[in-house]
Amino acid sequence: MPEIPLVPSLWRFPAHPASVRRARRAVAEALPYGLRHQLTADLGLLTSELVTNAIRHGSQREVDDLVELVLWPADGHYWLAVSDPGTGSGAGSHTPAVAHPDADSETGRGLLLVDHLATAWTVRPRPTRGTSVIAGLPLHRGG
């Protein structure tokens, strides 16, 4: 009989800066007790960066947009998907990409951190509108 996988954890938060801390806490509390010490810092940083980007670049301030998070274990990793409501495709849309800011820039380093921490990450369009950024952290880091 095949092993039945865990049901992914799912949260939706208002696209508001106060949701970053709530999202980080929710992800940390969803980890199994034995993995919290190992993964909380890195998953917390991934969560903060991806939720911040989703709020900043993928929502419209004048509507009640929600940012969605999904966390699940698979293939020796914990995977985090952060989805923004987006504005559709075309002229106003924004596809997340690694930037290379100069030393004086105060922003633009979030996806550099994601790229450094995650074993793999990608950007996927959502079926109707918006974007999902998916990143995986290994359960055991080589030393």
Image (cartoon, rainbow, N blue to C red):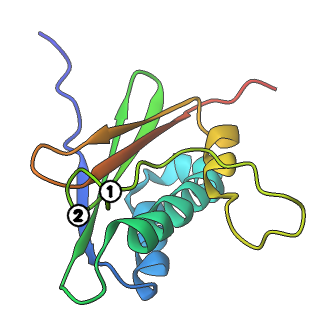
Q: Residue at x 41, y 39 (%)?
A: 79
Q: Give the quadrant of residue 119.
A: top right
Circle 1: element type: loop
Q: Is residue 43 above or below residue 121?
A: below
Q: Is residue 139 left or right of residue 51?
A: right
Question: How many residues crowd mark 2 within 10 Å: few (<14), some (14–19), many (20+)?
Answer: some
Q: Is residue 62 above or below residue 91?
A: below
Q: Earlier in the sequence, mark 1 or mark 2?
A: 2
- Inspect the image, locate mark 2, and give the three-letter code of the amino acid beneath it: Thr
Percent of width and height locating residue 36: 55, 54
Percent of width and height locating residue 76: 47, 24
Residue in front for this viewpoint, 52 or 58: 58
Numbered marks: total? 2
Q: Residue at x 31, y 73 (%)?
A: 59
Residue assigned mark 2:
87
Q: Residue at x 48, y 54 (%)?
A: 33
Q: Which mark is residue 93?
A: 1
